[in-house]
Image (tube, grey):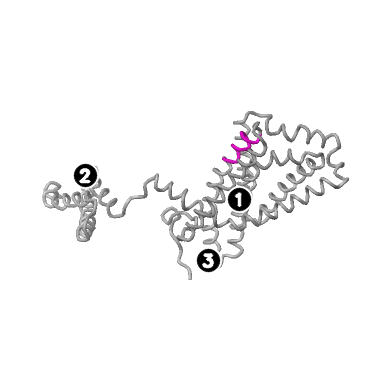
Amino acid sequence: MDIDAFVAVHQGEWDRLAELSSRTRPTADEADELLRLYQRTSTHLSMIQAHDPGGAVAAGLSARLGRARGRLTGGGDNLLVSIARFVMQVLPAAFHRVAVPTVVIGALFLLVSGAFALWTQHHPQIELLMSDEARAAYARDDFVDYYSDHPNASFAAQVWTNNAWIAAQEVALGVTGVWVPAVLLVNAQGLGVSAGVMFEQGEAWTFWAHILPHGLMELTAVFVAGAAGLRIFWAWVSPGRRRRLTALAEEGRRLITVAIGLTAVLLVSGVVEGFVTPSDLPAAVKILIGAAVLAGYWTYTLVLGGRARRAGITGDLARYDSGAHELTA
């Protein structure tokens, strides 16, 4: 094969391919022509590579075909556009999908925690768990000191890590159907016993002043993680008209979205617990800050999430990122 003669014969087509590839808004006829030239040039490249694979002509044609391919298939979204879409549509839609089970889980958690608090406060057998001296020391010093024993930044990081670990357990092991209730029960018991001891020692206001600023958002994040984990459990128990593996895959991808969002939510909660809860601000102001953070989350979830879901966004990954989809009847 005479490479120089081959180039002389087809150079015009290749130049035309490069010209059409540089058009920002080609007409319909130009788009059709671009596709034909792309296919023809691909054949030319394979012929040249058979005789001179490492030559300059093959490299030049590969570059032109690459630009043409980008024009024909289109590029991905701009990174900032993708981030904005995730924050303003995909993430709130994913939170909105688990809003109802989040509220149900939260109500059950508070009911169980309240039962433990009442038992601890009024049951005489509490002395078998904690002596009178231990309960007095806990209410007088230990409970409050927990929030100020370490520097604010390191304590916030520790809280964030601990809460993220709890949420991760609910998310990763939610498919079992038993891990989420077990984790929530243990935490409800711990909170209830702590509240009961504080109430019994006459430190109810101290308890609320130190729990509510960060606890409103922190517990909500734990409830969200539990709801997301149980969605995966329910996906394989009741997949509907989907195959079980398909249902698990879809819920798993949506769970990734929730997990990413919870990282940010728990970070905010950790900052509040590390810097606001132990601060010298009036207790009412600290509680208002916690309530504002919680209100911001639910406004984000219900307003933006509701709007996104009405637009058909489910919180799943985009079609390109999630791979091929199986058609089912």
Q: Position of residue 148 (x, y in %)?
A: 68, 30
Of labels 3 and 1, earlier in sequence is: 1
Q: What is the C-alpha distance between the residues marked 2 and 3?
A: 48 Å
- Residue that appears at 42% across and 57% down: 319
Height in image: 21 above or below 288?
Answer: below
Residue 46 horizontal side relative to residue 262, left or right: left
Residue 166 horizontal side relative to residue 127, left or right: left
Whether 276 is among the magenta residues is yes
Q: Which mark is residue 225?
A: 1
- Residue named by callout 3: 242
Please provide the residue range marked out in magenta: 268-277
Of labels 2 and 3, earlier in sequence is: 2
Query: Quadrant location of residue 212?
Result: top right
- Residue named by callout 2: 60
Graded by Cα atoms within 10 Å as few (under 14), some (14 to 19) or many (20 or more), the crowding at tag 1 reads: many
- Mark 2 vs 1: CB contact within 8 A: no
User: Is disc 2 placed on a helix, strand or loop?
Assistant: helix
- Mark 2 vs 3: CB contact within 8 A: no
Q: Give the dominant element type of the magenta stretch: helix, strand or loop.
A: helix
Question: Which residue sits furthest bottom?
Answer: 329
Camera-nearest residue between 266 and 242:
266
- Residue that appears at 25% across and 51% down: 68
Whether 153 is among the magenta residues is no
Camera-nearest residue between 305 and 44:
305
The nearer-to-camera label among 3 and 1 is: 1
Graded by Cα atoms within 10 Å as few (under 14), some (14 to 19) or many (20 or more), the crowding at tag 2 reads: few
Camera-nearest residue between 245 and 127:
127
The nearer-to-camera label among 2 and 3 is: 3
